[in-house]
Amino acid sequence: MTASSRPDWLSIGVFAVTSVALSWLVALPLWVRGQGLADPFLGLVAAAMMFTPTLGVLAALLVQRRTHGRRGTRAVLRELGIWPLRPAARTVWTCVSVIVAAPLLIALGLAVVGALGLATFDPVGFSGFQKTLEASVPPGTPLPPAAVLAAVQLATIPVGAIINAPFAFGEELGWRGFLLPALRPLGVWPALVVSGAFWGFWHAPLILLGYNFLEPNAFGVLMMIAACVLFGVLLGWTRLRTASVWPAVFAHGAFNASAGLGALVVAADSATPSPVIAGPLGLVMWGVFAVVIAVLAFSGQFRADRLDARLGPDPVVAPAPTVA
């Protein structure tokens, strides 16, 4: 995690094995019970899994303590991007920006889905949402207008991002707090791609049950890996730009809080497209992620002089001074 000419493969390996092994251990009840996505404990298990990367980080830190000696708490917090927030203004505003940007990304993906004719949306009458509400209560039960309820849900997405933050932190401390900086000596892009790919692979215990893509097979896992590489580049950029894990935490939380946006605006008579194509992490969203990544890349946002030097030097480009 400190600046080095090569990654600390021992601690990375311990982190990888620990986080994956624990993810399977936590998900094991879902496999034993055999109910798959219908299991009433699915949400609880998925939430608990999100803390396994943090346990992997703790295991890696123990290894580093044995091999490199004891370090102070402040040094560890700084290397994991937890504290201090320097530069504070950039970090805080990046957190605010990603909370706004995450639902906008999903909305853009939905717009593309609609433009391709894969689904029909009703963002005015919310007819599909109204139909779902009526089906969830006894016939004749009075309900508030669907538009009002939808507006409330849209307005509370930032609140949802904050509520989701502790769970997102459980993951992001591993992926962007520890793993991305640990791989940083390989170069910016290899570190982003490898950390994102491992993030996707870590989801296998749930993906193989049909989670996210309804593809309980190797194809579903590959879909998740590709989606996490693309989304991980964006989350990783916030980490590299600010030397803080918090923007990635709030972006992750806001994205999860916005993932059901399509259910709010879909029309009652709409076709139901495959989540492989039109889901929050499906092929359409891959295109959205790729466009945003391209804009950042062509505007020079991944250049060494735009990234925070505290995450370690790029082995190809000489380290730049810390940007104030």
Image (spheres, rainbow, N blue to C red):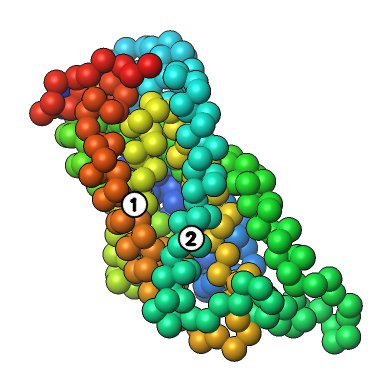
As rendered, which of 308 and 70 lies closer to the eye? 308
Q: In the image, residue 196 lies at what x, y percent?
A: 31, 48
State whether residue 185 is above or below residue 267: above
Instruction: Tell me the quadrant of the picture where the N terminus can be found.
Output: top left
Q: Which residue, as the protein is rendered here, is positioned at the far left?
A: 316
State whether residue 95 is above or below residue 193: above
Residue at image coords 62%, 42%: 162
State whether residue 120 is above or below residue 188: below
Kindly indicate the quadrant of the structure image that contains residue 80: top left
User: Position of 50 compared to 231: left or right?
Assistant: right
Mark-to-mark CA distance, 1 and 2:
12 Å
Instruction: Tell me the quadrant of the picture where the C terminus can be found.
Output: top left
Give the mark nearer the N terminus: 1 vs 2. Answer: 2
**Tag of residue 106:** 2
Q: In the image, residue 230 lies at what x, y percent?
A: 32, 53
As rendered, which of 39 and 2 lies closer to the eye? 2
Q: In the image, residue 322 lies at what x, y percent?
A: 31, 16
* Whether residue 119 is visible: yes
User: Position of 189 compared to 243: left or right?
Assistant: left
Label 1 crowd (10 A; few <14 / some 14-19 / many >=20): some
